[in-house]
Amino acid sequence: MTVIRLAMQSLRNRWLTALLTVLAIAVSVMLLLGVEKIRNGARASFANTISGTDLVVGARSGGLQLLLYSVFRIGNATNEVTWRSYKDIASRPEVAWTIPIALGDSHRGYRVLGTTNAYFKHYRFRDKQLLTLQAGRGGFHGLLDTVIGADVARTLGYKIGDKIIVSHGLGEIGEKHDVLPFEITGILAKTGTPVDRTVHVSLEAIEAMHVDWHKGYKMPGQTTPLAKILRMKFRPDEVTAAFIGLKSRLQAFKFQRFVNDYSKEPLTAVLPGVALHQLWSLVGTAERALLLISVMVVITAILGMITMILATLNERRREIAILRSVGAGPRTVVGLLVAETSILTLAGVVLGVFSLYGLLIVARPAIDRAYGIYLEIGAPTQRELLALAAIILGGCLAGFVPAWRAYRLSLADGMMVRT
Amino acid sequence: MACDMKQRTVLGDATIVPSEQGVAAVKHEPLPGATTALAEPSDEPVVELRDVQFAWPGRDGFSMEIEEFVLKRGERLLLLGPSGGGKSTLLSLLAGIVIAQAGSIKALGSDIGKLGNADRDRFRAEHFGIIFQMFNLLPYGAIIDNVLLPLSFAPKRRQRTVERGGPRAEAGRLLGALGLEESLFTRAAAELSVGQQQRVAAARALIGAPEILIADEPTSALDRQHQERFLDLLFAQLADAGSSLIMVSHDESLAARFDRVCPLHETVKSQRSESQSSSSSEALS
């Protein structure tokens, strides 16, 4: 007991170096765990964005590209799917439901997505959850009805009844479809997916916006007045992509082949899970590099701790000689030093874990806003616990380096107490 | 430096101790009366060195030889000699911190060289109290913890303190007897003066009444007045504990207070092999 109390007093006596060592380990643990959390968070965010959709169909392109622009609103479609083809596919007997989407316009940096009421009925995210409303009503009942995502509403301060103008193209500088004043009729609840950053209008409205447009350009000098547009009947010509739910998931591969071999138009169908897997193998290398760097940082912190203890070992030769003189065996001397590195490492790991969780709680909204990554704050995963255990074990083992040296020194010193 | 008459006779005295006596492998437990018996040295040896040879491994060729060295029960022995004469090495040998390459070192009937490492550490903890010249204490440790420290390694000594009212009480009693106020007990050792620290070291060496006290120049950091007082207090507690004392010093003026004075160079023949031929017998005069 006395020995342990004295060891703690020794540590307290060197509190500044001990504290810095603990901080170094804590920071390295935060980095390692943080990288792991963000990695998992990013994966989960992507994986949670679409759920229950068996196939995504779009114009012929890479499967990953199709998934990125249709589901994640990253990048742009190279081509559209004709309405006729869409209807043809949607009417196949294997198909349970379809959601057509049309992209290409934006509102103040947020993408505008044209769709049908099927979107609110069938689109599912994280564990097959349907979209829910926080205000107003879902679906499109008039041509100008607009349903916006939670982030759009919060960031731009919109409420039900506000009027908005949609721009052509994606930047803020796109030409305005200013004839049509869209009215916000619904605000969706937060989903933690790109839906939060999307403005939803009806497919007919997309057509209506482009009344005076031809092949992506506004016809000069031609402006159809709103009253006339509202009386017009619209039928979509084309869609950007479609989400498809099949009656049986078992038919997914067969139906995918059918779409890919569709003879009337070059189309691509992807299974979201497969395309996501492609994405992970793509970013896996970067992830591994990041992980490797964090492991290196942890090793650096442990090396720093060994250095700190070795540096103080010379002045502690006296301490060790005293302990030896009162009958402490080499085992006690080694034990004390190993206990010291173990305690420092443990303290570092605990501090690191708690700081990381604190940081996550504080930074989560910002990360969500900036990157659309919604970080789950849960208990450490088994993998993370294993990593932490490995760090603690590494710290204990690291103690044997100064301990071995201290023991050698104590043999060489005998009873001589160094000043 | 020549040996005076007293030392000669005393040294003669030591040689007549029959060498077989230490071989009787009786493990000496402290006699029940030992704590009260006053310091009248008996002929029974508590420490006995014969034909010991030692060289530091891997050092610059310092080696030493001790033909014979005996400490009797209850004896207060002063080893007189300058530093560099191998006194620290001798004390390391006695306490079993280093091991002789040849010869036998017996303490309380046990051959220290034949004990295993762990047993030797335990033996030192149980039977030796050690006071260094200075820097005796763990500077950040509380006074009371510094005193209690040996008991962590010495169950028998702890048991003896329990019989006398518990480790803390006994530590407090010793500190008090050595002139340290109770308000200091929980202070860090580094806050004390050198003289106070030496007295704490004495309390640590004495706690649990080990049979043999080894003191390496314990008073050299003190002025004359404090030296006297330190030795008074030390000897009083020594008698109380019934322990024997080997003290090393270069200060001849302390000689009068000891039962026996022995010049280091007559006990220890040391040499450094840097320039092998010229200084091979520097310690012999």
Image: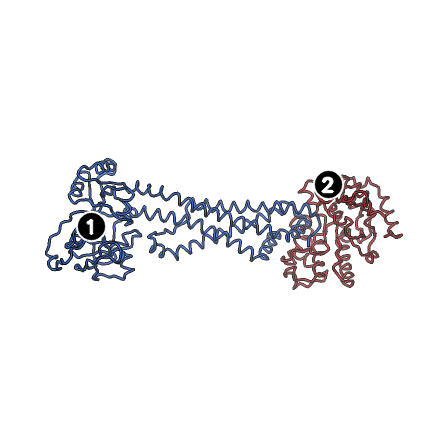
Q: Measure how far apart labels 2 and 1 are at the Cα level.
A: 92 Å
A157, B29: nearer the viewer: A157
Return the residue found at the far front: A220
| x and y, in percent, of residue A251 in the image | 23, 36
Q: Chain of mark 2?
A: B
Frontmost of labels 2 and 1 is: 1
Q: Residues within 10 Å of mark 2 (few under 14, many from 20)?
A: many
Residue annotated with mark 2: B113
Same chain for mark 2 and mark 1? The answer is no
Kind of residue at disc 1: Thr
Residue annotated with mark 1: A115
Q: Eyeballing the image, is B67 above or below A221?
A: above
Q: Residue at x 80, y 46 (%)?
A: B268
Kind of residue at disc 2: Gly
| x and y, in percent, of residue A306 in the image | 56, 49
| x and y, in percent, of residue B52 in the image | 78, 41
